[in-house]
Image (cartoon, helix red, strand yellow):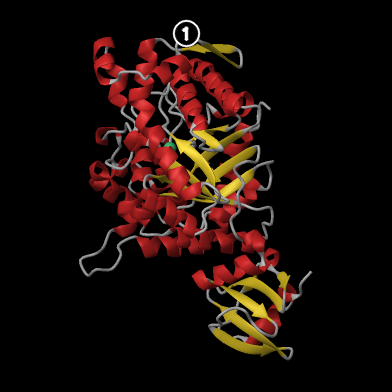
Amino acid sequence: MTRLNTLLPALQQALQEKPVSVYPESCFEVSGGELCIADFGAYDALLFWGENCPFAAAESALMDGLPLAKVALDHDCAAVLHRLLPFTAPKPVLSRERTFGMGDRLGIATLGHIRAAKKFDIYPVFAQQSMRELTLMCKTYDDVIDRVTFQVLQAGFTKGYGADGDHLKTLEEVNGAIASGCTMITLDCSEHIRGEGAAMDAAALSAACPLSAELEQRYLGQTFAVGGTQIAFTREDLQRCVIIYGEAIGFAKKIYDCCIAGKEVELEISIDETATPTTPAQHFFAANELTLAGVQFITMAPRFCGEFQKGIDYIGDLEQFDREFAQHVAIAEHFGYKISVHSGSDKFSVYPSVGRMTHGRFHVKTSGTSWLEAVRLVAQADPALFRELYQYALGVFEEARAYYHVSAELEQMPPIDGYTDDRLTDLLELPASRQLMHITYGKIMNEVNPDGSLRFKNRLYDLLREHREEYTAMLEKHMEHHLGLLFSQQ
Ligand SMILES: [Zn+2]
């Protein structure tokens, strides 16, 4: 036990700007002293008390005859923390039975995620951003991991967490994410998946894809017993598999060999961002070919039937989903990896099945829903700002949808004038306006005034700072709802 949280009056006396409190769970003894994170009202800072401070101090003082350093929460500070307190650094967790990704675009949501994660038998992936999200938020993987590092320390969460370089598409992106400390790479193979193969007839398939003797021997005239089902390939099925997935498999093999083999980095293969669903036979083919090529992966994300659109519940036939999902799980179990479910934000109707049918071995990713909770907070705490955001979002929706697959149309979004302040959050219950606010975050964060200043970003961060406890409590409840459903039928 450290004493820092009991020394607030002495800290206030020693420092020029007075901390209003010390986060009690952030107090740790480390070699050479004690440290904690303190709340200075408008911002947080790290305090180190002891000789030989390993951090670059922004301010130094004496407290009880010992040096006290006030340290900015920056990248250098995070790097020292990773060394002093290894639980603050990401580590590989994906091989654990239950893993759950909780992306935090704003860099302040992990505190709420931690409170929810603590209540369930899962290993969290708190740092999880796609290249698309990084670009839209003007961030780097260093930023993302640094922000999680401080929040993990602030909450004293020592269990360990993963960092996912999500939906990466090139060798440079993968190497960059690994260099920044990502412990998991989600390799997005979508640009190498040739979906047009799904619609080709027999003649077109034969013309486009003469099968090698090796592949014919491997797949034709055989049945593969997988779980309770049999998987067999006609010549056409096999040609289709080769056309759609052949190049993607080669791409995954190349990235694995160049960037991942021999490193302590876990690989997820993502084939989910395609127009047509992955059939069980195609899933089997991809898994089998990857395995034969020596690619070691921990999870795979097929494209399931129905729609997993951003920020809203599953759209589709639940019985069909269950039926096909069971086959995908059986294939994953056959090869010894886990099924990964992407765009898991708000997919409440499939969560019980996902928990039950995977026998409690899953990876699920969420991200945008935590941003939407921030938007909900704005609607409650500053209705005028919310009105401004909503109006702005309507104007940039068509541009923003280039990045995301959503079915919402502008004419489905009600004019905000019809809503009184106390009913503004109702807009976040409507799928269309929910998607509107979900996908326009990048535009909102980067919009500038005519004088060059940011139009919304600082106001949003100030408001969320002011209401930080409320935001954390909202996220705790919201993510608990997600996780509770995953565990509901186990
Ligand atoms: Zn995905």
> Relative to 209, is 414 above or below?
below
- Pointer 1 residue: 221
How many C-alpha atoms fall within 10 Å of the one at disc 1: few (<14), some, or many (≥20)? few
At x 36%, y 61%, the residue is: 457
In this rendering, would 191 be left or right of 286?
Answer: left
The reply to whether the residue tagged 1 has its Cβ within 8 angstroms of ligand 1 is no
Task: Write down the quadrant of residue 176 in the picture.
Answer: bottom left
The percent coordinates of residue 295 (x first, y second) are 51, 37
Task: Kindly tell me whether residue 74 is visible in this rendering.
Answer: no
> Relative to 65, is 251 above or below?
above
In this rendering, would 63 be left or right of 416?
Answer: right
In this rendering, would 167 be left or right of 92?
Answer: left
Quadrant of ligand 1: it is top left
Which residue is at the far front?
213
Between 469 and 118, the one lying in front of the other is 118
Q: Amino acid at mark 1?
A: Gly
The percent coordinates of residue 1 (x first, y second) are 79, 69
Which residue is at the far right?
1
